[in-house]
Amino acid sequence: MNSSSSSTMSLPVFAENLVDKVLESVLCKSSRATPPCPATHYSSPSSSSSSLHASTRSDLQSTAVAATRSGTAREGTGSAAQQNTSPAKDYFLFPTSKFLGNLPDIMTEFIYFGPGPAKLPKEVLETMQKELLDLNGSHVSIMEMSHRSPEFNTVINSTIDKARKLLNIPDNYKVLFLQGGGTGQFAAVPLNLIGRTGKADYICTGSWSSKALKEAQKYGEANMVHKKLDKYGSVPDPSSWCLNPEASYVYYCDNETVEGVEFQFVPETNGVPLVCDMSSNIFSRPIDISKFGLIYAGAQKNIGPAGVTIVIVREDLIGKALPITPTVLDYAVMAKENSLHNTPPCFAIYAVGLVFDWILQNGGVEEMQRRAIAKATTIYDLVDGDYYSSAVDATCRSHMNVPFRVKKDEALEEKFLKEAKALGLLGLKGHRSVGGIRASIYNAITPEHVEKLGEFMKSFKQNNP
């Protein structure tokens, strides 16, 4: 085809749809119409605006044709063109800012890698949207529903049942839904459990377990069982632990989100009840619940929105709270009343139930584990080199949170974050205490999402040697 025929070249479907979406956005913006604003509305505007729309469409078509023919895509930020032979990738980076000022690229898929509150499965969000005004024919929103109603009783009990099914929770464990997040459990655990002997042991491998220890020391003799680490990035050898056989419990955090340290084994405590903070990796792999006295997890990282904390506690540990324990943190009170002593976070519990449905429909925790390993491997394969680097020992690298540096160059890391954001890769900034980059790849992050991040990491390395 010669150059003179380019203006009449037929657009592929993806480009035709893109043109329609751009025009739809322009029309909706100019008329301030309430969405949806169908693209077909531009077929019968006033004569003057019709000419403008026709001209705009012609410009868009010409650009789309040129992008398609050359196989070239440009970011709207004006960076150098990158060769790409896939039309799908072309429209992913289509420069709509040429026509719409500072509006984001319409066809960009935004992927949120934030550490928590974190990404939820799209199917879950769509179900929430669909059911928000009327839950199961009740004519009441879950956000309005009484926690004493039969409808909510069904919601909370079905969510408990799904948790039991996913993790094979034994009958002698209670499943509670509490408020206060993981930080609330820093206090609730010692308040409920330390009273047996007044002593507790803590394994501290990162920021969260260290904060838990500090809180527990308010209520009893809580000790770190190993030498304090100079920096976090490993799990101390169990042979170096000094466990107290008189401790009321042994506490650890299974996955430290800030540092990216995850236990690859369950600590042996010689009969002392084991307590675990699984806020960021619960339901990402099978768990032998019988090895634990108590497991808790804030929902907002891997199983739902912020506002609810799941507690799985063995029945024989309930009923021994210190007299100063606030009622809302007393496991015995909450277990007796099915987490309904006070108004629970109804919407958050409902949302957790939807996430459990999604996990069940996608192969259960066994499939979540398979995906988690594959996703983490994709990134770690890129991190192990002279360009990207990880400070975490290979024996305890997290499958949920992958922190890394870019040549240990803060300016280069800022550029990495800026360019990633321009491509729709969001939430990658490392925790303020450690800096760098961090990709949180919880259950809702798909292998395809991680592949896109990996491709960007490769291209960034190539373009910024």
Image (cartoon, rainbow, N blue to C red):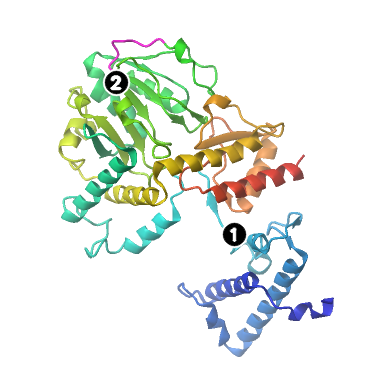
Q: Farthest residue toward the bottom?
A: 47
| Residues at marks 1 and 2, CA–CA distance in whole angstroms | 49 Å
Vertical arrangement, residue 50 with respect to residue 390, above or below: below
The structure residue drawn at horizontal position 28% and vertical position 19%, both measured from the top left corner, is 219
Magenta part, dominant SS: loop
**Residue for badge 1:** 108
Q: Position of residue 216 (x, y in %)?
A: 33, 21
Question: Which quarter of the picture shows residue 125?
Answer: bottom left
- Amino acid at pointer 1: Thr
Give me the disc on residue 273: 2
- The region drawn magenta spans 242-249
Residue 245 falls inside the magenta stretch: yes
Residue 158 horizontal/vertical position (percent): 25, 49
Along the line of sight, which residue is nearer the eye, 149 or 435? Answer: 149
Q: Position of residue 326 (x, y in %)?
A: 21, 30
- Say which element carries label 2: loop
Q: Is residue 169 magenta?
A: no
Report if the CB atoms under discs 1 and 2 are less than 8 Å apart. no
Residue at 48%, 33% in the rendered image: 257
Front residue of this view, candidates 266 and 392 = 266
Observer-side mark, 1 or 2, equals 2
**Type of residue at label 2?**
Pro
Q: Is residue 33 left or right of residue 250?
A: right
Where is residue 300 shown, x and y percent of the image? 40, 43
Above or below, 306 relative to 205: below
